[in-house]
Image: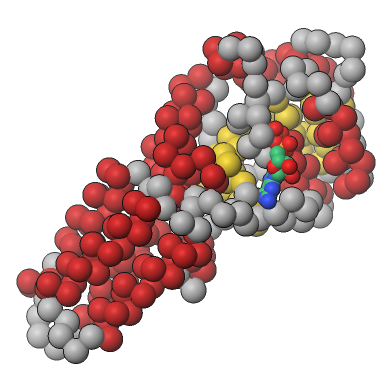
Amino acid sequence: MVLQDLGRRINSAVSDLTRSATLDEKAFDNMIKEICSALLEADVNVKLVGTLRKSIKQSVNFKELPAGVNKKRIIQKAVFDELVKLVDPHAEPFKPKKGRANVIMFVGLQGSGKTTTCTKLARWYQTRGFKACLVCADTFRAGAFDQLKQNATKAKIPYYGSLTQTDPVIVARDGVEKFKKERFEIIIVDTSGRHRQEQELFDEMVQIQGAVKPDQTIMVLDSSIGQQAEAQSKAFKASADFGAIIITKTDGNASGGGAISAVAATHTPIVFIGTGEHMLDLERFAPQAFISKLLG
Ligand code: GDP
C-alpha cells in the first residue's frame, strides 16, 4: 500500500466515525481496528501497531468521556498524536555548525540510495551557506567513485576519492584530513553498501568510523524495504552506531511503514526523506508536519 493510501484510509476511518450519527464505543473500536489494519498492511511493525491501538484507547478513554465534550475533536487529536509518536523518537539529531568541520558519514545497503543522497545532502547544506564536500570511501563497488564524481560535478561540489587506493579506511581518512585543512564545513563520507560477507561490511564501517570520527552517522533506508527494516537497522546499529536515518524513494510505490518502524526499533530520528531521483528531491523531515501531510 502506498503511503498516501495509508493516509487516506486513516483519514476516512476517522471522518466516517466523526460523521456518523451514533458516536458510540463500538464505532470508536471499529475506527481503531480500521486504522490498525491500514498500518499493518503498510508494513508497520505489529508490536508498534499494538501499542498505538492501546494508546489511542487510553488517551480517549471513551467510557469516561463526560457528556458535552467534543468527542470528535478528542478522537481526532488522539489519532494524530499517536501517529506522530510513531515517527518521533524524541531524540535530537546532530545540527552542524558553521565555522568548523562537521563530518557526516553515510551507511546503508547497496542500492538504498546512499550515493545519491550524499550529494543531495551536500547540496542542501551548500545552498544554506555551508562549504560542503564529498568523500567516496566505497572502494568495493567498481564505478562507485565515478558515480559520486558525476553527481558532485553536476552539483558543483568538491569531491575526493581514489582509483588506485583499495583501502577505504585510508581513502576516508585522507579525504577528511584534506578537506579539514581546506576548512570545509560539511564533509560527507560515502561508504560501501556491500561486501562479500556482511561481517566484513560492518567491520569496515567500524574502522572508517574510527578513522574519521564522524560528528554524525546517517543510515540510509530504502522505503520499499518493508518488514526487514527493523532487523536491518538493528544490525547496523549494533556495529556502526548511527544517530539519524534518511528514508529514500518515498516518491515510489512503497508503503514506507517498515522504514518508519526502524525509527522506533532504534530510537533514531528520521532527518530527511528522499522524494525523487533529482538532486533537489530531498525534504527535511519533521514528525508533526509529516503526519499532517499524510492525513491531508
Ligand atoms: P547506493 O548503492 O546506496 O549508493 O544507491 P544509489 O545512490 O546508487 O541509488 C540507487 C538508485 O536509487 C538510483 O537509481 C537512484 O537514482 C535511486 N534513488 C535514490 N534516491 C531516490 C529517491 O528518493 N527517489 C527515487 N525515485 N529514486 C531514488
Residue that lies at the very extreme toward the left in this rendered image = 63
Which colour assignment does the render follow?
Answer: secondary structure
At x 36%, y 75%, the residue is: 12
Relative height, residue 22 to residue 112 (above, below) = below
Q: Is residue 24 or residue 263 the one in the foreground?
A: 24
Q: Position of residue 4 (x, y in %)?
A: 50, 64
Relative height, residue 252 to residue 212 (above, below) = below
Q: Position of residue 123 (x, y in %)?
A: 80, 48
Q: Is residue 93 or residue 230 the one in the foreground?
A: 230
Ligand 1 found in image quarter: top right
Q: Position of residue 30 (x, y in %)?
A: 20, 68
Q: Is residue 21 or residue 98 the one in the foreground?
A: 21
Q: Position of residue 72 (x, y in %)?
A: 26, 81
Tally of marks: 0
* Residue 289 appearing in the image: yes
* Residue 100 appearing in the image: no
Left-right relation of 48 to 151? left
Relative height, residue 31 to residue 284 (above, below) = below
Which of the 4 quarters of the picture holds residue 7?
A: bottom left
At x 73%, y 29%, the residue is: 189
At x 79%, y 51%, the residue is: 279
